[in-house]
Amino acid sequence: MGISVLISVYGGANAEHLGVALESIAAQTLPADEIVLMEDGPLGAAHRDVIDAYADERTLVIALEPGDDRPSIEGKRAAAVASAGCGGDAGSAPRLVIGRFSENVQLGRALAAGVILCSCPLIARMDADDVALPERLATEAAFLREHPEVSVLGGAIEEFDGDVVKGTKTIPGGEALRAYAKFRCPVNHMTVMMRREAILGAGNYRHFPGLEDYELWSRVLAAGYVLDNIPDVLVRARCDSGFYDRRGGDDYGHRYLELRRMQREWGLLSRREHLKACAATAAMVYAPRSLRKLFYKILRRKG
């Protein structure tokens, strides 16, 4: 089964971190077939230098507009493939596919277009500032090959900030995952390997700022697909002080409570579970930053 690695980057991202992320994908023991890099709006010269280092004559550059739908995006990729050169000895290096938006469309829309651009049946998500461990792709691909019933697979992460390791976040799999998903996001997004057909079948990513992943996994579960986790640490994930700020405030709270309403509507939550989830969400999101930080630390210890 071929593997596409899907990354989204925007102008405010750290170019050096992007280089480290791409290097970690290039160093995989099981090489990816392609890296689909979504440029979410204009990038700086430093980003361009990093990206150009991975480009060759096989690279596809596909200009995208915010209103492009699936047929349009698929047509643009087909046209790019038809006009691109295929010569040269690339060895085991993955092909670079660049989806270039002229303006920032935000993460959910960028990833939705990226899933459509991916040509392989398996898609590995990767954040532009994280580090994939060398065995990541091999470990996940082997599991999915042995478990064809699983459509979305996640793993554990090691969180770090600079030289400081903050801890490991492991999420349960198997039967425990569905119960976990009622109240918390059931997979670490930056570790996910997923079957392209299942993600498209569930409706793909949507614009749902801050909760793009949890909203998608809820729809995947509601559609009857299977999610699972393995305990292996697959990715080193950067976790800076802004993490706690991004998970609070009125806008984030309103979206989270809207997600709870949809989870109830989709049959994922009973009435009692819905009330419990809404209360817990409100307490977390609207708490002062210091308390929110404490809540997250407690949740991490509980797993």
Image (tube, rainbow, N blue to C red):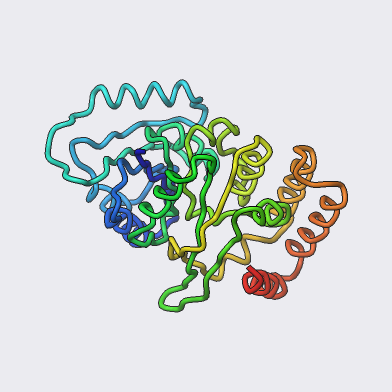
User: Does 280 sit above or below residue 97?
Assistant: below
Residue 55, image quadrant: top left
Q: Nearer the viewer, residue 86 or 209?
A: 86
**Quadrant showing the N terminus:** top left
Left/right placement of residue 87 relative to residue 298 reads: left
On the image, the x and y values in percent for residue 261 come to 79, 43
User: Does 22 sit above or below residue 302?
Assistant: above
Left/right placement of residue 258 relative to residue 20 reads: right
- Residue pictured at 30% horizontal, 55% vertical: 28
- Residue pictured at 53% horizontal, 53% vertical: 189
On the image, the x and y values in percent for residue 100 come to 38, 37
Residue 303, image quadrant: bottom right
Left/right placement of residue 72 relative to residue 88 reads: right
On the image, the x and y values in percent for residue 110 come to 48, 40
Residue 25, image quadrant: bottom left
User: Does 159 sit above or below residue 214?
Assistant: below
- Residue pictured at 13% horizontal, 32% vertical: 87
Q: Nearer the viewer, residue 291 or 224?
A: 224
